[in-house]
Image: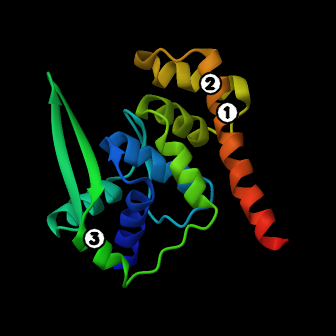
Amino acid sequence: MLNRHAKIIRLIEIVGEVSGRKKLQKMVYIGKHLQMDFDERYEFHMYGPYSEELTLRVDELCNMGLLDEQMESKGAIHMYRYTLNETGRDFLRFHEVDFGSGERVIRRMNEENSRFLELVSTILYFNDLPYEEMKAKIFTFKSKQRYTEEEIQKGQAFVEELRAMMTEDDDSRLN
C-alpha cells in the first residue's frame, strides 16, 4: 500500500517542488499515460483528467508529515506547493522507486505550467479519437480555457517529445 505513496514522494523528490494541485494531477496522469508506474484511477473532470485517489494520497502524505504543503493566497486564488521534507526522504530509503527514463520526463513536465499540462492531459484523454474530434472535444469541454489550434498542436508535439524521451532512454540502456 505505501508503495503507491512512495511513488508520489519520489516524483516530488525528482523535481524538488510541484506548484499546484492541478499540476501534480496532470503530471501523474501524463506519466501514467506514458507507462510510468502510477496506480491512480482517473476520470474526466472540470480541469481535465482527475484522480480522487491521488488527492487523498497527497492529503495522507501531508498528514503523515512526509510532504510539506504550503498554501499561498493570490487574491481569491489559493496555490499549493509541495516539497519533500527529511521525514519523506527517510521514508524513501525503505521504498525503492525507480522511474528509469521517466525521471527526465517528470523534470520536463515540471518545466511547464498547469494550464498547458491540463491541455496535454486532455489531449491524451481523447487520444483514441481522430484529430478533428479530439480538437472539437477540447474546444467544447475546455471552452473557458480558450485553447487555440496552435496550442493543441504544441501539446501534441510535447506528447511526442515526452514519448521520444522515454524510448530514447530505453534504447540507450539496451546498447
Q: Is residue 128 left or right of residue 13?
A: right
Residue 59, how many percent across, how many down? 21, 59
For the residues marked 2 and 3, what is the alpha-carbon distance in whole angstroms? 37 Å
Q: Is residue 121 shown above or below 130?
A: below
Q: Is residue 116 visible?
A: yes
- Please, what is the three-letter code of the amino acid marked with disc 2? Ile
Q: Is residue 14 left or right of residue 81?
A: right
Q: Is residue 40 shown above or below 87?
A: above
Q: Residue at x 31, y 41 (%)?
A: 20
| Image quadrant in which you'd find residue 148 | top right
Nearest to N terminus: mark 1 or mark 3: 3
Question: Which numbered dot is residue 88?
Answer: 3
Question: Which numbered dot is residue 156?
Answer: 1
Residue for badge 2: 152
Residue 119, how many percent across, how many down? 52, 31
Q: Is residue 144 shown above or below 80?
A: above
Seen from the viewer's position, the closer of residues 169 and 142 is: 169
| Image quadrant in which you'd find residue 159 | top right
- Please, what is the three-letter code of the amino acid marked with disc 3? Gly
